[in-house]
């Protein structure tokens, strides 16, 4: 008998002024058995072209027009324009953590980035209270990126599995993958944002967080590939310590 996955939503409020909760879209998540891996016919691939060298632990890559931006876990962002790579300074409000897999991770550019310089970043930091991950806005101006607003703080962090992928969806919301910080059981803890995909409502003063629960007992979400194959469809990479990596297709039932 095929196993059926149930998906639950957990809403939380991180700013004042949220007096009522609107009904949120549900997710449908097909099982791996319903979507077996199929072999594709062989295709010819052209020789790769090098764009930049000597990067320091490159992690996320995004683009604005023909210009590429690459985050380095050590704290820099490399801009590649017309084949010329330039490392740009990033000024963050917290000290970057130097744990394994940690540092400056995800980067997503606002749709109006070319005019506003607004972007979103995910990074691991340490302070007197411990080591955590946070999601912030960055402002790019004259080759310098400066942290401005805090969107979400104190996401779980540990020795590994920090998460960090960011993507803006066609619904205007920001999606982020949060790691399980090496504690696999928190992926199924509805009260903990770790090991899940988070959706942030960026509109207005009420920034709402939706935890999109991944229905697998020891799974942590590690990535969201670029692009949305449908109006409200996204692929995510899911890893279990007991099994292999798995690609999942998630669909929102309504926008």
Image (tube, rainbow, N blue to C red):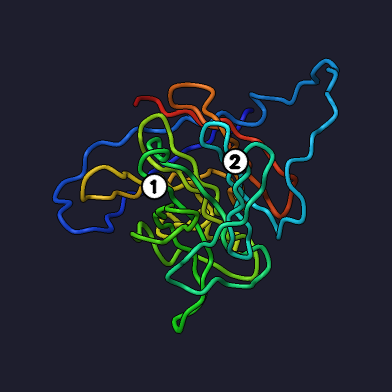
Q: Which residue is mark 2?
A: 68
Residue pictured at 41% horizontal, 61% vertical? 147
Vertical order, 210 against 90 (above or below): above
Q: Is residue 75 left or right of residue 121?
A: right
Q: Quadrant of residue 57?
A: bottom right
Q: What is the secondary structure assignment of the residue under circle 2?
A: strand
Q: How many marks?
A: 2
Q: For this rendering, which residue is in front, 182 or 141?
A: 141
- Crowd class of label 1 (few under 14; some 14 to 19; many from 20; radius 10 Å): many
Q: For this rendering, which residue is in front, 221 or 189?
A: 221
Place of residue 131 in the rendered image (x, y in percent of width and height, measured from the top left): 52, 74
Place of residue 229 in the rendered image (x, y in percent of width and height, measured from the top left): 54, 23
Q: For this rendering, which residue is in front, 220 or 85?
A: 85
* Marks 2 & 1, CB-CB < 8 Å contact: no
Q: Which residue is mark 1?
A: 118
Q: Quadrant of residue 43?
A: top right
The alpha-carbon separation of the residues under discs 2 and 1 comes to 15 Å
Q: Of label 2 and label 1, which has the lower sequence position?
A: 2
Q: For this rendering, which residue is in front, 192 or 103?
A: 103
Which of the labelled discs sits on residue 183, or is there none? none
Q: What is the secondary structure assignment of the residue under circle 1?
A: strand
Place of residue 97 in the rendered image (x, y in percent of width and height, measured from the top left): 58, 72
Question: Split into 4 quadrants, where in the image is the N terminus?
Answer: top right
Place of residue 3 in the rendered image (x, y in percent of width and height, measured from the top left): 60, 33
Residue pictured at 63% horizontal, 58% vertical? 72
- Crowd class of label 2 (few under 14; some 14 to 19; many from 20; radius 10 Å): some
Q: Quadrant of residue 26?
A: top left
Residue pictured at 41% horizontal, 40% vertical? 113
Question: Split into 4 quadrants, where in the image is the C terminus?
Answer: top left
Residue pictured at 48% horizontal, 58% vertical? 144
Furthest-bottom residue in this view: 128
């Amino acid at each position: 008998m095929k196993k059926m996955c149930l998906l639950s939503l957990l809403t939380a409020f991180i700013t004042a002024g949220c007096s009522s909760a609107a009904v949120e879209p549900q997710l449908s998540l097909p099982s791996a058995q319903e979507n077996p891996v199929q072999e594709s016919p062989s295709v010819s691939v052209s020789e790769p072209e090098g764009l930049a060298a000597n990067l320091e632990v490159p992690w996320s890559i995004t683009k604005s027009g023909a210009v590429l931006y690459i985050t380095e876990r050590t704290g820099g962002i490399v801009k590649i324009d017309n084949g010329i790579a330039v490392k740009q300074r990033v000024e963050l409000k917290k000290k970057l953590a130097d744990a394994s897999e940690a540092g400056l991770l995800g980067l997503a550019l606002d749709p109006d980035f070319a005019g506003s310089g607004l972007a979103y970043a995910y990074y691991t930091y340490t302070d007197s209270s411990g080591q955590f991950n946070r999601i912030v806005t960055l402002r790019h101006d004259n080759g310098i990126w400066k942290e401005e607003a805090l969107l979400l703080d104190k996401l779980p962090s540990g020795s590994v599995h920090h998460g960090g992928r960011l993507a803006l969806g066609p619904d205007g919301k920001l999606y982020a993958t949060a790691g399980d910080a090496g504690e696999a059981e928190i992926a199924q803890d509805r009260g903990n944002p770790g090991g899940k995909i988070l959706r942030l409502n960026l509109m207005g003063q009420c920034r709402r967080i939706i935890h999109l629960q991944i229905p697998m007992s020891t799974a942590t979400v590690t990535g969201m590939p670029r692009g949305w194959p449908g109006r409200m469809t996204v692929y995510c990479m899911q890893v279990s310590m007991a099994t292999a990596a798995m690609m999942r297709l998630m669909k929102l039932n309504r926008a």
